[in-house]
Amino acid sequence: MTAGEETDDELVLRALGGEDRAFTTLMQRHQAPLYGFARRYVGDSEAAGDVVQEAFVAAWKALTQFDSQRSFPVWLRAIALNKCRDRARRLAVRKLILGEKSDQSFEAQAQPDPAPDGEESVLLAERRAVVQQAIDRLPVKLKEPLLLTYFDELTQQEVASLLGVTVKTIETRVYRARQQLAEILDRSAISDKFV
């Protein structure tokens, strides 16, 4: 059996046994989806990369605490979610001290980079910035379930377990998040096809 065929649980056991390559395989297997989640949550590609690195370091340190009854990707997502929350708290403090002029402000992030492939690329970047701004405006209690279920495709049961609430609560929060997102995008004259 090759490393690509091994389950996450088998790789975790090998990593716990001291085999660093097993954890490297886990990182390679889960890096792209974890980055996608972090990118949508923090709204910045560089910061998302930092979050993913922090999440993997924390996962490595806490690997002995992994419960094999739980899905490894969901466990890893919980760590990344906490890293995203930590980052948001740090930025809130920085914003309080420095004001809105930080490089992480929406104004700094929303400016599309001029692309060599023309106007269509610029329009796409502007739309993405508007959608990201709309997602950023959602309350955290609505934003997190929306990102985890709609974009990361975790089940409502997995998200409920991760966030420590009931499945019905997740269902309600996702519904409300989609409603608020649609309202924000309607006010921004963006089609509801993004929701």
Image (spheres, rainbow, N blue to C red):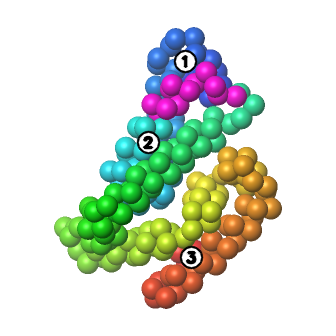
Label 2: how many Cα within 10 Å (few below 14, some 14–19, many 20+)? many
In the image, residue 159 above or below residue 194: above
Q: Is residue 104 visible?
A: no
Circles 3 and 2 in contact, beta carbons < 8 Å = no
Name the residue tied to disc 1. Answer: 15
Please state the horizontal and vertical placement of residue 6, each as a whole percent of the image: 61, 24
- Sequence-first disc among 3 and 1: 1
- Residue at 57% from the left image edge and 80% from the top image edge: 182
Q: Nearer the viewer, residue 188 or 103?
A: 103
According to the picture, the residue beneath numbered tag 3 turns out to be 181
Quadrant where the C terminus sits is: bottom right
- What residue does disc 2 label? 52
Q: Residues within 10 Å of mark 3 (few under 14, many from 20)?
A: many
Q: Is residue 62 magenta?
A: yes
Viewed as shown, does residue 143 lie left or right of 107?
right
- Secondary element under disc 3, as helix, strand or loop, is helix
Residue type, numbered disc 1? Ala
The picture quadrant where one finds residue 14 is top right
Identified by mark 3, the residue type is Leu
**At numbered mark 2, what does the secondary structure look like: helix, strand or loop?**
helix
- In this rendering, the count of numbered labels is 3
Q: Position of residue 125 (x, y in %)?
A: 34, 71
Which element type, helix, strand or loop, lies under badge 1? Answer: helix
Which mark sits nearer the N-terminus, 3 or 2? 2
Determine which quarter of the picture holds residue 101: bottom left
Distance, label 1 to label 2, CA atoms, is: 19 Å
Query: Whole-percent x and y of residue 131?
Result: 46, 73
Q: Are marks 3 and 1 in contact (CB under 8 Å)?
A: no
Span shown in magenta? 56-67
